[in-house]
Image (cartoon, helix red, strand yellow):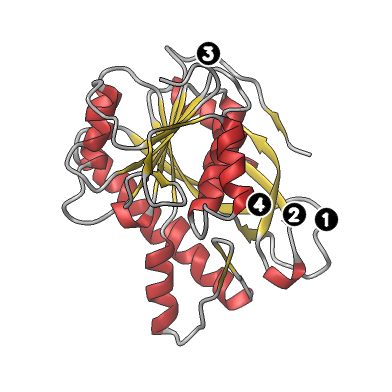
């Protein structure tokens, strides 16, 4: 069961939740400069980020094996320490520094800060992977109402059913974190910036728009696989608020984010409730 807490103050308009995947954080990426432009327009933005590829690179340096199950990293204690250091430290601060250097206003935090993302262990065989139980939006609302972009690492607070001597920190999939925050804030839109142009059907054809039911069918049939599974699940969680839409799009293309908000997008896959256009 999931629920949110915290006093929610209304911001200028509904929040845009942008999930940045590690594949979109290259030196030629324009996503962060686009985000600064959108902030200057007065859009309240929350960023959730991953960084799986960076984590894997650091694990290789330490000769620590990496294994994924349905898009989630199996996380033992050594892996948890590395994930925490890389995502809550290096990756988070690089994103925040880049936004601030470009004239934006951003503050970095993790799901541990302000007890933002509260979780329990999902499956003992997966190790210290968290299942989100509660989202406390208080710190996000405080930052949004002060004109900052919260940049959220998926490292989360082990707040429920914690065995004795187990860590206070859990690794949670960044896509899942994005979906839960979007749902808790009743976001206007959840945007996944990836390195692919959305979702494809069983024949490999790009799908431009999906209803929640159609998205669920892709999961059930196995057409959606790997890292696309948690993204689609996160979209379904967010669009449970019927006024929220979700788009999975290629964030590596030049100014793809600005084009989307300027009405010149269309290259991704939109998941939404309502008329399909």
Q: Which mark is residue 120?
A: 2
**Whole-percent x and y of residue 77?**
63, 75
Q: Quadrant of residue 33?
A: top left
Q: Which mark is residue 161?
A: 1
Which numbered disc flags the more N-terminal residue, 4 or 2?
2
Q: Residue at x 35, y 36 (%)?
A: 106
Distance (Cα) linking label 4 and label 2: 8 Å
Distance (Cα) linking label 4 and label 1: 12 Å
Q: Is residue 247 left or right of residue 226?
A: left
Label 4 vs label 2, nearer the camera = 2
The residue sitting at the front extreme is 203
Is residue 62 depicted above or below 157 in this figure?
A: below
Distance (Cα) linking label 3 and label 4: 26 Å
Q: Residue at x 39, y 83 (%)?
A: 61
Write down the residue under mark 4.
157
**Whole-percent x and y of residue 21?**
39, 51
Q: Residue at x 64, y 59 (%)?
A: 170
**Whole-percent x and y of residue 144?**
45, 25
Which numbered disc flags the more N-terminal residue, 3 or 1?
3
Q: Residue at x 61, y 71 (%)?
A: 75
Q: Quadrant of residue 263?
A: top left
**Whole-percent x and y of residue 202?**
47, 51
Q: Nearer the viewer, residue 173 or 114?
A: 173
Distance (Cα) linking label 3 and label 2: 30 Å
Which numbered disc flags the more N-terminal residue, 3 or 4?
3
Q: Quadrant of the C terminus?
A: top left
Write down the residue under mark 3.
10
Dot 4: what SS?
strand
């Amino acid at each position: 069961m999931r629920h949110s807490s915290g006093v929610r103050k209304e911001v200028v308009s509904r929040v845009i939740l942008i999930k940045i995947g590690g594949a979109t954080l290259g030196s030629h990426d324009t996503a962060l400069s686009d985000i600064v432009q959108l902030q200057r327009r007065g859009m309240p933005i929350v960023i959730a980020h991953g960084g799986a590829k960076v984590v894997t690179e650091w694990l290789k340096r330490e000769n620590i094996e990496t294994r994924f199950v349905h898009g989630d990293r199996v996380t033992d204690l050594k892996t948890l320490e590395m994930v925490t250091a890389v995502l809550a430290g290096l990756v988070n601060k690089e994103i925040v520094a880049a936004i601030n250097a470009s004239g934006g206003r951003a503050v970095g935090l993790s799901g541990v800060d302000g007890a933002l993302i509260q979780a329990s262990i999902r499956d003992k065989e997966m190790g210290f992977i968290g299942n989100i139980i509660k989202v406390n939006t208080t710190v996000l609302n405080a930052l949004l109402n002060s004109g900052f972009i919260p940049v959220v690492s998926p490292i989360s607070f082990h707040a429920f059913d914690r065995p004795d001597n187990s860590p206070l920190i859990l690794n949670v999939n960044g896509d899942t974190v994005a979906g839960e925050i979007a749902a808790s804030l009743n976001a206007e839109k959840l945007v996944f910036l990836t390195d692919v142009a959305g979702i494809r059907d069983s024949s490999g054809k790009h799908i431009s728009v999906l209803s929640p039911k159609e998205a669920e069918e892709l999961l059930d049939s196995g057409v959606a696989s790997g890292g696309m599974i948690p993204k689609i699940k996160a979209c379904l969680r967010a669009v449970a608020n019927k006024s929220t839409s979700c788009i999975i799009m290629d964030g590596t293309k030049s100014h793809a984010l600005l084009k989307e908000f300027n009405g010149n997008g269309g290259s991704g896959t939109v998941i939404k409730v309502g008329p399909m256009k």
